[in-house]
Amino acid sequence: MLWPVSIRSAVEARTLATLMGLPVRAQRLVTGPALVLDGQTLAPDLQVMLTLQRLARKGDLAGESIARGRASMRTNAAIVGGRQRIGSIRDLAVADLPARLYEPSRRRPGAGLLLFFHGGGFLYGDLASHDAPCRLLAEESGVRVLAVEYRVGPEAAFPAAFDDAEAALRWVHEHAAELDVDPERIGVAGDSAGANLAAYTAIVAARAGLPLAFQLLVYPCTDADRTTESLRLFGEGLYLTAESIASFNDTYLPRPEDRVDERVNLLDVDLPAGLAPAHVVTAGFDPLRDEGEDYARRMADAGVQVELKRYVDQIHGFLNVLGVGRTSRAAVREIAGKVRAALG
């Protein structure tokens, strides 16, 4: 019998939650020996998830049509994200872009606002795909999160996403009174491609003298022509693959001049004075690990206040894994604590 997609997804979510919630000893019966690479051990619950995805031939976005890849990302995000608590949600338009404002149940007095840009290789992702992490970040931090759905390729060619991110930050400043937020307590955040957008938006803000209090960069991509050890070590079988990354680049950055543009090559940017304090998060088993850490060190060398945290047992995409397993949720709750400290 062929079940409707919603029922099938619910069954998959329940099965995944059950198996990822088993004691580690039982999980090893599903996965076999622990995966150890570069002196790091993959979290057992994530190894279960990857094993099941591999058996079901799911999880790797490379080779799919863009339309199917987008649909797959939304479906998978719903399965692993669960239904996270939040005080309230309001949809609105930010610089003519779809946006969603997450209001925590207990908003901290004087708390700022975190402007969030989703990941997805500049081709995938939307408000739905990153609903769960935005809920948890807001609820755990006591800080409102404003997620913006920027234009993606190939329909909107590079650098449309970067233009949208900059426009969104300027809109927030222009509407600070309407949003009931102190312009001095605004931060930017994102994961993967969204972290690239957040990082460059912070640079634009510093150059323009626009106040920015914080930047949260979760496994950011910072080098379009990466040749890193982490790409070699973790480029296959760990959700984000080297093949997927190459496909994203070929589609969104097809011209050689695109790949040397400072917006996607943050390791070559002349960093301005006044860059906002940053919390940079990387995952031990992520092909983008090394470039994210290189950017953190580059900011620190330029005098920026930077805190770098590597979650050694995690994979790319762990920000979304909140409704199943234990380790990713614990990591994201810790990240929310950094938001609370910076903006709450």
Image (tube, grey):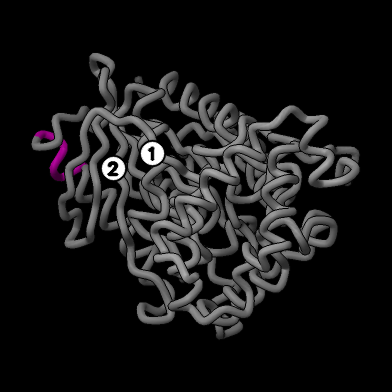
Q: How many marks?
A: 2
- Residue drawn at the location 50% of the way across and 51% of the way down: 11
Give the amino acid at mark 2: Leu
> What residue is shown with label 2?
146
174 drawn magenta? yes
Q: Quadrant of residue 172?
A: top left
Crowd band around label 2 with a 10 angstrom C-alpha radius: few (<14), some (14–19), many (20+): many
Q: Which mark is residue 83?
A: 1
- Residue drawn at the location 17% of the way across and 42% of the way down: 90
Work out whether 157 lies above or below 177.
below
Q: In the shown orientation, is residue 62 left or right of residue 237?
A: left
The answer to whether residue 200 is seen in the rendering is no
Mark found first going from the N terminus, 2 or 1: 1
Whether label 2 touches label 1, CB < 8 Å: no
- Residue drawn at the location 52% of the way across and 47% of the way down: 13
Q: Residue furthest front?
A: 1
* Mark 2 → mark 1, Cα distance in angstroms: 18 Å
Q: In the image shown, does 228 or 267 lie closer to the viewer?
A: 228
Q: In the shown orientation, is residue 298 left or right of residue 122?
A: right
Q: Quadrant of residue 225?
A: bottom right
Give the amino acid at mark 1: Arg
Residue 71 image point, x, y percent: 43, 68
Residue 165 image point, x, y percent: 34, 57
Q: Quadrant of residue 293?
A: top right
Q: In the image shown, does 293 or 27 lie closer to the viewer?
A: 27
Q: Where does the magenta region start and end?
A: 173-177
